[in-house]
Structures are given as C-alpha cells and as structure tokens.
Amino acid sequence: MRNFGWLAILGTLFSMPAYAAGLTLWQFYQQAQQGDMRYAESRAAYAEARTLGSTARAAFLPKVMLNADTTYNELTNHFLGGLPGLPFPNGTFDFNANGYGVTVTETLFDMRAIEAYKAAGHTVRAARFQRELAHTELILAVARAYFGLLLAQSELHLAHAEQRALSIEMQSAEHSFRLGTSSITDANEARARYDVVTAQALRAANAVRIARHRMMRMTNHGARHLWRFNLARLPKPPAVEALAADLARARRKSLALEVARAEARAARAEARAEGDARFPRVEAIASYAYARAGNSMYGFGNVEHQKTIGLDLSFPLYQGGELSAASAKARARARRAAYALERARRLVRYDVHQGFLNVRSDYAQIRALETAERASRTAFQSERLGERIGIRSNVDVLAAQQQLYSARRALAAAVFGYLINRLELAAAISHLRGADLQELNACLRPPRGHGQPMGKAATAG
C-alpha cells in the first residue's frame, strides 16, 4: 500500500509521551484472557455443560448398589396358648441382627434414555460453540477497548493542540482589537471558540478516563500508554468478488449458526425423548443378600443367603397426563429452536452483507478523508498567509483551523472504525482467533521513547 499523505500528521496524532512501558494489543488480549470475568464465566459454563454427557451415558452403564445393616434387638414375648409338642418360650430376648447385600442393575432397553443421550451430545456441542463464540466476543471487546482508548487519547491530543492554537489566536485577536486594527467581533469569536474547545478538551479527558476504566474492568490492570497504529500498514479491504465466498463460508462456519443448529438438534432430540417415555423399559437385575439374626421370638436365630437374577419390565400405562404434557412442552421448545435457527440464518446473512459493505465504505471514506485533510491543511495555511498580508480576518483563520481539526478527528475515527469493522466481519463469517489480533498487533509501533522489541515481541507481546 502506498504511503498516506497524512501519515506524518496522524503519526503525531496517535503518539503519546514516553512511559515506563507501552501496552501492546496482544499483551492486553493476554491479560483479558486471564482477567475478563465474562470470558471466565463462559469457560465455566462449558465445563458445566460437559457433565451432561456423563450424566446421560450413566443410563446405559451398570448400577451397583451395596447395602449393609446391623441392629440390636430387645424382644419381649408372651405366647397365649400353643400347639402340643411345640413349646414356644416366653420372656425377653436380646440379640444382634446384621446383614449385607449387593444389587446390580443394567438397562437393556430404554428409548427415552437413548434420545436423551443424543440431546446431551448436541447440548454439549452447543456449549462448545458458545465458548468459542465467547472467545470471539472477547477479541472484539479487546479491540474495541484498545482502539477506543487510542481514539480517546487522540481526541484529547487534538483538543489540546487546538486549544493551544486558539489561545494564541485569541491573544492575537484581543491584541489587534486593542490596537484598533480589528473589530470586537474577531476578538469575541476567538474567545468563544477557545471556550468551546476547552469544554471539548474536558470531555475528551473524561472519555480517556472512561476508556481506561473499561480496559481495567476487563483485565483488572491499569492501562496508560498504548502502542500506536502504524498507518502505513493499514490492511486492505476484501475484494468485491469475495462477498459470495464469504456468505457461503458463513453458512458453514458461522459460530452463531453452529450454536443455533446444535440447540435445534438438542431440542428435537429432547422432544423425541419425551415422546419415547411411553415405551417400555427393560432392565436386568441381579442381587445377593446375606442376613444373620442371633435370636428371635421363637428362641432360635438363623442365617440366610439369597441370590436372585431376572428381568424387570416397566410400562407406563397412565401417569395422570404428565407424559403427554412433557412431550407437548418439548415439541413446543423444538419449534422455538427451529425458529431461532432460521432467525440466526437471516441475521448472519445480514451481518455479513452489512459488515462487508461497511468495510469497503470505511476504506473509501478513509481515502476521501485523506484528501479532505490535505485540502483543509492547505486552506488553513492559505488563510494564515492571507491574515499576515491583510486580506483575511482572524475569523477566517479560525474557521479554517476548525475545519482542519475536524478533518483530522474524522480521519482518526474512520481508521479505528475500519479496523473494528474488519474484525466484526470476520466474526460474522466464522470466528476470531488470536492470529487475527496478531495481524493487527503487527501494525502497531511503540510510543515515543521505546524501541522496537526484539524478535516477535511486537506480535507475540
């Protein structure tokens, strides 16, 4: 890309005084990965969702139950009557009774559990895409916060520069008025513009503070001096022919669509699971039990061993309408998920179209603002020269100067808006990776007073 004519101007515009260290975009991203609570919440949500697979798989694995008991018994017994030859003792008996048992249950057939397992798989898949989507949103938030602070600092730098220039113009206009070479209108106009710019500088200073706190909220670390953007490395926009390919890729790879697809599949599987609850369930059961009693009311104890094995068939005939209601609710949820999927398709298609057009128009706007800035700078120089030779008034100079600073502000905002829109377009098409930030980080250069880091420090932080 050819060097921009406004490179020297915006190089000064985005520069900041030397400080202990400058924070790169990549370093801020690494801090945000560790410190951003929203991103940490998304990772915790994914870890929670992964347990659904194990929970659903448990329905098909054997279940082993061990039980044991021991009791002390005190029995007082008095028989009335009795059978000849079978005397039963009367009195009080105290004895221990204990036992243990093991039961193994294995599900052989359960259609509801099968569909629930499929639904859990789709839910886990949706959670994984949600985590990747949260990572993409983190990258976008990092870029917005970083470039937002750069832009706020640029606005403050411009406001201070304009304030200094207007202060000189105001003093000159007041001096000329006192000498009688200019009117009171020129002096009042100069002071009015100086007051306006002073208020703008205060607002810009507050914007810088807010932008810093926004970055601190993400990382819990302070951020003061950032690396500047090297305008000679401004990335180019996509070609016009790339729109069709971007739309096709978005239909396949968009994270928003992947989440909606997985959630729709999970909802359909859950609806089938609730509908299959009316089918029978077959289980195999095997058990072993041991029991020992030291005595009884008959005057003697016993030891018992019991082994069982068999099949258990359960068939829900009527559950008070619970199964029908659950099935109807699941079908309604599946329809809602299907509508959400279609809405996501339309939204992704719209976002890609909008992002693509925004990126190309932003780049064209940058080129136009480059020309406007050069023209404003030339006009300002001409007005200054005209004032010196007496053919232009101080009001004309102030108007030209304000136009110049307005052009520079618009140019700075257009550059950063272009960079953010590029990332948003990539996010709408597919997803964002750390490499996307590394590409932008390679376009940065350190603040004045800091040399270029060794090796890949500019890229890898």
Image (cartoon, grey):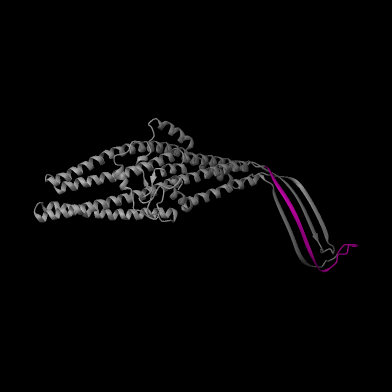
Residue 44 percent location from the top left of the image: 53, 51
Image side of residue 84 versus residue 139, left or right? right
Locate residue 341 relative to residue 370 in the image: left or right: right
Q: Quadrant of residue 304?
A: bottom right
Q: Quick one: which residue is furthest to the top in this view?
A: 241
Question: Which one is nearer the viewer's eye here, 77 or 241?
Answer: 241
Asked whether residue 245 is drawn in magenta, I would say no
In the depicted structure, whether residue 322 falls above or below residue 78 = above
Q: Relative to residue 339, is residue 377 drawn left or right?
A: left
- In the picture provided, is 95 more to the left or to the right than 261? right
Where 378 sits versus 97, above or below? Answer: above
Q: State which quadrant residue 429 falls in.
A: top left
Check the image and name the residue furthest to the right: 85
Q: Residue furthest left?
A: 180
> Residue 82: percent from the left, percent from the top?
86, 64
- Magenta part of the chain: 82-108
Is residue 141 something that shows in the picture? no
- Of residues 202 and 62, the one drawn nearer to the viewer in this rendering: 202
Q: Position of residue 361 (x, y in %)?
A: 33, 37
Q: Magenta span has 89? A: yes
Along the line of sight, the residue nearer the viewer: 23 or 323: 23
Q: Main secondary structure of the magenta part?
A: strand
User: Residue 131 placed where, x, y %?
Assistant: 50, 46
Report the number of discs: 0
| Residue 423 vs residue 326, the one in the foreground | 423
Task: Determine if residue 169 is in view.
Answer: yes
Q: In the picture, which quadrant includes the N terminus?
A: top left
